[in-house]
Image (cartoon, grey):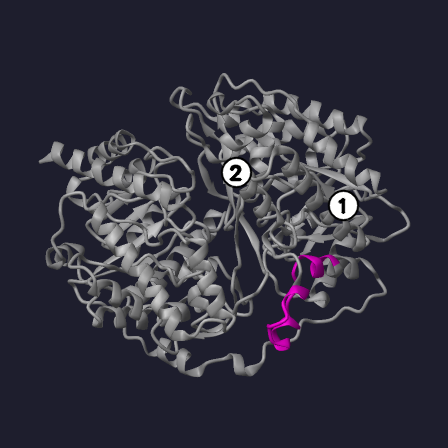
């Protein structure tokens, strides 16, 4: 990074690790099913890393990040690197240990999983206790560094920084009340000293330590500890500290004073850091990586605006690099794989490989500095804008909850239900694909979907569930399905990004004003209801989640875009109700995800996010019950917003976190229906009736039993029927057991 021949250097902070064709997903799932042994998995991983290095090398970067590949999760990789593996996960081989922590097995539940800051990526939460004895395990970092060095590349090993690792951790179950994992920063820093020393001995000149937790509010004692840690680490090697998820803010002077050799700035979401640096006494020998290329969205960089930021930073340092704002983990690999998108859209897009070229272009002083073209006028929909403007006051409010619940359908104590989706079999996916390619006529496709719905309804009635779902066989993804039917969206053929482990998603592209031309779900829900006397929930995805799990236009405020999506959903809700649907679930699993990391920005977000949900749902009659669902989040951060959604019932992930959300609900005096999940569907484990009943007893001890629902943590799309049938049978049995204890 300190090549004196270039005025501006080029690098990125990370790169997609799933492979251009979801190669990681296929290898992992083959290994888990027993079709690929450890040697085969290692070979597949090596091939993916080789392609990653090919991409980085061909871009002509001055420095390439290494160690950014992961078989499942980079936080889990850090757990391994510091030997902080929970005892229950240790197995006979390293691979078995790794996947026991990631997925659980018949012996132990996995680590808790939650969202990585304000993204849709999920990380595994380290469990740290007073007795956690850290040890340096640099083997992975060394091996991947050596792979790049063997190619003659200027390699920069990347590790999750010690402060963020502990700030993202939770206290282990055996830790005493009041224990804070961050108190072990001194011990962990000693292990990082050994990790860095091993990398230096292997030839590393620079090491990148990612400290995204410094982009959130940090108190004075935390900042003092961070400064002390980096004063210990900086003498060992040139250290580049990254934030990547907003402004570093008050952490910047701490890092400068600690003498770190380089700082990477997120100048997409944290441009205020430039002014902060201008006010500090920064050595001109300090390397600054200017994150002007968005690592989290797919719009082309405005090279003219980016060049202006680079010019400001030139006045601060002689060692300037152009970079991505964060790791490119969050964007698809290659735009050239998309042949069906209109040129008016692709001309405005850049995926990971294209972003590498943008970085290189900005580092080249001879390259032209072009402004991104403005959106075409026909992307505006004046009818939608007029309808939103004409919404009457109170259009986002319903009658009081007490009045609603008295008018809504009577159900058994502790009613049982699922979150929405049922397993998506290979046969089902083939039918959808054939229909999409024109190889199955509409009549045959509809017959196939109806047959699946009938089977799912029969399955639920046999199990004895109280509120049923149609199973969503027609849906490839809970956001993409709606994006394909709303104007203003485009969907990709190969725009895959990693959500967690082998789970990949294709976020739609929300590029223009949004409208709903016709009903999207009414046919399937109505057909399901015709097959049973039990209530069938209508299933929709909420406006905030549609935004969070799409690549969203950046030419207007998110709040305005959310209102447009909400208006389209309001029309769908009205049509479902008119068709006789008595319970409508509008899922918002991403409500916590978009919460700003900085507290001073949160109230504005809460206002527009909850208003959008209410616009979508408040037009129903008093007797129509509105549900929502949230998963894998720190719910305490958004508990007030959950209440302000004003849903009648909220189902929440709770099994991996051992019902911790109940304390948040109690503190917030939450008084509506709640379904804390009793089955972790992201693990292949089938929990016993006793396990689920124990969780349910915790729920009814903390919440009025009359308001408690019984459900899994999330939808069942990714599970197999061999797991779903026994798990749901156990869930129903657990509800009956605890119901009997209460009656």
Between 140 and 37, the residue placed more toward the observer is 37
Q: Which residue is found at the position 45% from the left and 32% from the top?
A: 104
Q: Secondary structure at mark 1?
A: strand
Between 25 and 352, the residue placed more toward the observer is 25
Q: Residue 713 at what x, y percent from top left?
A: 35, 44
Query: Which residue position holds label 2?
Result: 32
- Judge whether residue 601 can be spotted in this image: yes
Which residues make up the magenta segment?
Answer: 336-356
Identify the image quadrant of the N terminus.
Answer: top right
Query: Which residue position holds label 1?
Result: 64
Compared with residue 510, is residue 477 higher up or lower down, i.e. above or below? above
Q: Quadrant of residue 227?
A: top right
Identify the image quadrant of the C terminus.
Answer: top left
Tell me whether circle 2 and circle 1 mark residues in contact (CB < 8 Å): no
Please state if 168 lies on the left or on the right of 743 as rendered: right
Q: How many marks?
A: 2
Q: Which residue is found at the position 45% from the left and 71% from the top?
A: 440
Q: Which residue is found at the position 17% from the left and 34% from the top?
A: 738
Q: Quadrant of residue 41?
A: top right
């Amino acid at each position: 990074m300190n090549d004196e021949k270039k005025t501006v250097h080029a690098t990125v902070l990370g790169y997609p690790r799933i492979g251009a064709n979801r190669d990681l997903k296929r290898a992992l799932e083959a290994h888990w099913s027993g079709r690929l042994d450890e040697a085969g998995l290692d070979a597949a991983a090596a091939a993916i890393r080789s392609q990653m290095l090919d991409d980085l090398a061909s871009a002509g970067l001055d420095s390439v990040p290494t160690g950014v590949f992961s078989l499942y999760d980079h936080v889990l990789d850090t757990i391994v690197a510091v030997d902080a593996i929970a005892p229950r996960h240790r197995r006979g081989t390293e691979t078995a240990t790794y996947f026991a922590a990631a997925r659980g097995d018949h012996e132990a539940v996995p680590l808790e999983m939650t969202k990585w800051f304000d993204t849709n990526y999920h990380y595994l939460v380290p469990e740290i206790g007073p007795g956690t004895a850290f040890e340096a395990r640099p083997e992975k970092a060394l091996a991947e560094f050596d792979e790049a060095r063997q190619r003659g590349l200027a390699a920069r090993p990347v590790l999750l920084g010690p402060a963020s690792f502990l700030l993202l951790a939770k206290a282990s179950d055996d830790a005493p009340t009041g224990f804070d994992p961050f108190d072990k920063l001194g011990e962990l820093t000693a292990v990082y000293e050994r990790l860095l020393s091993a990398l230096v001995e292997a030839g590393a000149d620079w090491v990148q330590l990612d400290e995204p937790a410094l982009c959130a509010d940090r108190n004075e004692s935390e900042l003092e500890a961070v400064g002390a840690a980096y004063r210990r680490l900086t003498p060992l090697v040139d250290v580049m500290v990254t934030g990547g998820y907003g402004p570093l803010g008050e952490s910047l002077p701490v890092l400068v004073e600690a003498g770190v050799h380089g700082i990477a700035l997120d100048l997409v979401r944290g441009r205020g850091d430039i002014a902060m640096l201008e006010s500090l006494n920064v050595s001109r020998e300090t390397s600054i990586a200017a994150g002007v290329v968005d690592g989290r969205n797919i719009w082309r960089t405005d090279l003219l605006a980016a060049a202006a930021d680079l010019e400001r930073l030139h006045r601060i340092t002689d060692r300037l690099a152009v970079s991505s704002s964060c790791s490119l983990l969050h964007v698809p690999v290659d735009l050239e794989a998309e042949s069906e998108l209109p040129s008016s859209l692709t001309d405005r897009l850049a995926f990971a490989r294209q972003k590498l070229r943008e970085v290189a272009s900005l580092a080249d002083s001879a390259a032209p500095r072009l402004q991104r073209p403005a959106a075409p006028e026909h992307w505006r929909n004046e009818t939608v804008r007029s309808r939103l403007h004409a919404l009457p006051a109170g259009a986002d409010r319903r009658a009081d909850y007490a009045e609603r619940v008295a008018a809504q359908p009577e159900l058994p104590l502790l009613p049982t239900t699922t979150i929405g989706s049922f397993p998506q079999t290979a046969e089902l996916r083939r039918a959808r694909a054939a229909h999409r390619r024109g190889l199955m006529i509409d009549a045959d496709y509809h017959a196939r979907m109806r047959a699946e719905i009938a089977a799912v309804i029969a399955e639920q009635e046999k199990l004895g569930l109280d509120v049923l779902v149609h199973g969503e066989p027609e849906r490839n993804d809970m956001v993409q399905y709606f994006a394909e039917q709303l104007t203003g969206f485009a969907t990709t053929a190969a725009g895959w990004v990693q959500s967690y482990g082998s789970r990949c998603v294709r976020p739609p592209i929300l590029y223009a004003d949004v409208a709903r031309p016709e009903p999207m779900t009414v046919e399937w829900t109505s057909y399901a209801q015709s097959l049973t006397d039990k209530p069938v929930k209508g299933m929709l995805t909420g406006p905030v989640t549609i935004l969070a799990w799409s690549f969203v236009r950046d030419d207007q405020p998110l709040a305005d875009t959310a209102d447009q999506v909400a208006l389209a959903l309001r029309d769908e809700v009205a049509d479902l109700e008119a068709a006789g649907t008595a319970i409508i679930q509008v899922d918002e699993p991403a409500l916590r995800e978009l919460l700003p990391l900085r507290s001073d920005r949160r109230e504005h977000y809460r206002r527009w996010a909850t208003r959008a949900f209410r616009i979508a749902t408040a037009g129903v009659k008093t007797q129509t019950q509105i549900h929502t669902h949230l998963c894998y989040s720190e719910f305490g951060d958004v508990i007030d917003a959950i209440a302000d959604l004003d849903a009648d019932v909220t189902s929440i992930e709770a099994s991996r976190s051992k019902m911790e959300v109940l304390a948040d609900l109690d503190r917030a005096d939450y008084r509506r229906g709640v379904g804390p999940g009793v089955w972790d569907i992201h693990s292949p484990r089938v929990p016993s009736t006793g396990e689920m009943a124990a969780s349910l007893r915790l729920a009814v001890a903390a919440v009025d039993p009359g308001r408690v629902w019984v459900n899994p943590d999330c939808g069942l799309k990714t599970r197999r029927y061999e797991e779903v049938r026994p798990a749901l049978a156990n869930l129903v049995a657990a509800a009956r057991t605890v119901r009997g204890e209460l009656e």
